[in-house]
Image (tube, grey):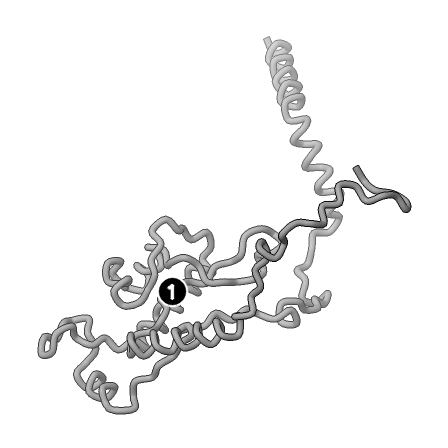
Amino acid sequence: MTIKHNQQIQHNHFRKDWQRRVRCHFDQPGRKSRRRNARVQKAAAVAPRPVDKLRPIVRCPSIKYNRRVRAGRGFSLAELKEAAIPRKLAPTIGISVDPRRANLSTESLAANVERLKAYRARLILFPRRSGQHKKLDSSKEEIAEHSKEGKVTRKTGMALPIKDISREEAIGEVSKSDMPKGTENAYRVLRDARSEARLVGVREKRAKAKAEEATATKK
């Protein structure tokens, strides 16, 4: 029931112990610095490996947001196959895999394959055991170069950050010269096509009757 005019306040429960039910986040600045220190410590602990796994570029759902891109759950098996990365090797080198995801367009497939190739080109794979060099590991020269002091970088962010295009880049003016040339008398062409589709049965019946009549007169 809505309250109108200057009436008495209904059900005025003003003696509730609200202080016991309210939580104040006065520790927010301290938690912020604590989270940052935890990210730095994790980056130092897992270095030279990246902190987060590499994730694909996907479009947001719905017509309202599909112009935006974001990080997805994992790369599809088709993308890994195109990039020549074995599906069982991918999680061990910092690439997230989603076997249920399917590519609905060649553009997304090409973009994520390019992302995988760029990551693979920048990746330095150290052998698991010293002296046991495998086929997919990096060369001994690259390992020796990046094992030097000061070469290992510790980053708390994403390996290949996803950048969304701005509103100015997404929206542009289209001139008449850029538009494709349309069909002349397009309305007339559409009306004729609809008429032909609607009268196809009647015309076939009429042509068949006319042919039967012609054969009957010949006899």
Dividing the picture into quadrants, the one containing residue 135 is bottom left
Q: Which residue is mark 1?
A: 113
In terms of depth relative to the viewer, which is nearer, 40 or 21? Answer: 21
Q: Residue furthest right?
A: 5
Q: Quadrant where the C terminus lies? A: top right
In terms of depth relative to the viewer, which is nearer, 184 or 119? Answer: 119
Q: Residue 148 vs residue 83: left or right? A: left
Position in image of residue 27 (x %, y %): 52, 70
Residue at coordinates 44% horizontally, 65% vertically from top-left? Answer: 111
Q: Residue 86 vs residue 135: left or right? A: right
Q: Quadrant where the N terminus lies? A: top right
Residue at coordinates 61% horizontally, 71% vertically from top-left? Answer: 166
What amino acid type is highlighted by mark number 1? Val
Whether residue 176 is situated above or below residue 121 in the rendered picture: above
Q: Residue furthest front?
A: 15
Dividing the picture into quadrants, the one containing residue 126 is bottom left
Position in image of residue 195 (x %, y %): 71, 32
Whether residue 120 is situated above or below residue 145 in the rendered picture: above
Dividing the picture into quadrants, the one containing residue 147 is bottom left
